Amino acid sequence: MHVVSGATLDRWTALSDEDVVARVLDGQTALYEVLMRRYNERIYRAARSIVRDEDEAEDVMQQAYVNAYLHLRQFDQRARFSTWLTKIAIHEALARARKRGRYDAIDFTEEENQAVERHPSRNPEHHAFAGELRVLLESSIDELPDGLREVFMLREVEGLNTAETAESLGVSEDVVKTRLSRSRAALRNLLGERAGILAPDAFRFPQPRCDRVVAAVFARIS
């Protein structure tokens, strides 16, 4: 088994997730790299939102990819591959956080779950800030309570819809909506009206780290 690279990798990027999975199961295991590179940033963000540590998030990523590879035949396409993979990563991250006694998700009553505020409209100003403000946003997200933090990360930073987020976290859509509303309110308290401005740019996963995760996973599944 070898890592696909450069033009060889580009040849396969147009394939759907399902096509790549089918080819991997058919023996083209090197193509698993396509899936890892396609979702590295999402999986990193999901893991980090729970463990709140960059190095541990990478460990979670590697284990999640290995677990997904070992159980790839169990992917039945009832959900998107990306959602299936995200659930595996979240399960691994939660298991680690709970084992260390570092995770205590807040809970809401059914009445509270119905009190959901609408998403505020976006405008061009949301893309005008950088640098120090992004650092402030990332640190503020880290301060959100367990339960709110990963919902905000998946919905606002990674861009999953409510149904995908609910499926990934194993909660109801009402819970996702309520926790997203509360996370926004908490961030508004920290950042004022500019909360969420740079959410799509937070917790980037640069190429060198992407390469390291891919190489480590292939070393383990080889």
Image: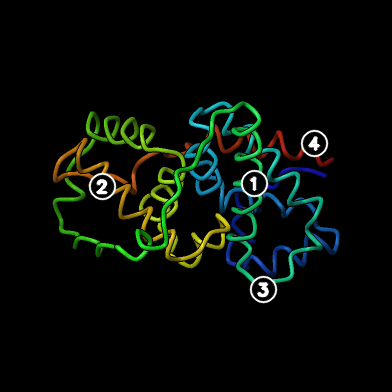
Along the viewing direction, whichever of 177 and 129 lies nearer the viewer: 177
Given this view, does label 4 or label 1 mark the residue nearer the observer?
A: 1
- Mark 3, residues whose alpha carbon is within 10 Å: few (<14), some, or many (≥20)? few
Foreground label between 4 and 2: 2
Q: Give the residue pinned by disc 2.
A: 196
The residue nearer to you, when weighing 195 against 183, is: 183
Task: Please give left or right for residue 92 compared with residue 171 in the image.
Answer: right
The answer to the question of whether label 2 and label 3 lie on touching residues, with beta carbons closer than 8 A, is no
**Contact flag, marks 4 and 1 (Cβ < 8 Å):** no
Dot 3 lies on which element? loop
Amino acid identity at mark 2: Gly
Disc on the earlier residue, 4 or 2: 2
Given this view, does label 3 or label 4 mark the residue nearer the observer?
A: 3
Q: Secondary structure at mark 4?
A: helix
**Of the numbered discs in the image, which one, if any, rests on residue 78?**
3
| Picture coordinates of residue 129, whole percent (x, y) | 19, 40
Task: Point out the tag, 2 or 3, that comes first from the N-terminus.
Answer: 3
Query: Where does label 1 land, which residue?
Result: 91
Q: CA distance from mark 2 to mark 1?
A: 26 Å
Q: Give the numbered dot on residue 172.
A: none
Q: Nearer the viewer, mark 2 or mark 1?
A: 1
Look at 46% across and 39% down and name the residue there.
146
Identified at 42% across, 47% down, the residue is 153
Badge 1: how crowded within 10 Å, few (<14), some, or many (20+)?
some
Q: Alpha carbon of mark 3 to alpha carbon of mark 1: how far? A: 18 Å
Which amino acid does the dot numbered 3 rest on? Arg
Instruction: Residue 53: give x, y in percent of width and height.
Output: 51, 27
In the image: residue 203, left or right of residue 184: right
Residue 168 in the image: state x and y as whole percent.
56, 57
Q: Are marks 4 and 2 in contact (CB under 8 Å)?
A: no
Question: Counting residues from the N terminus, which is met first, the one under dot 2 or under dot 1?
Answer: 1
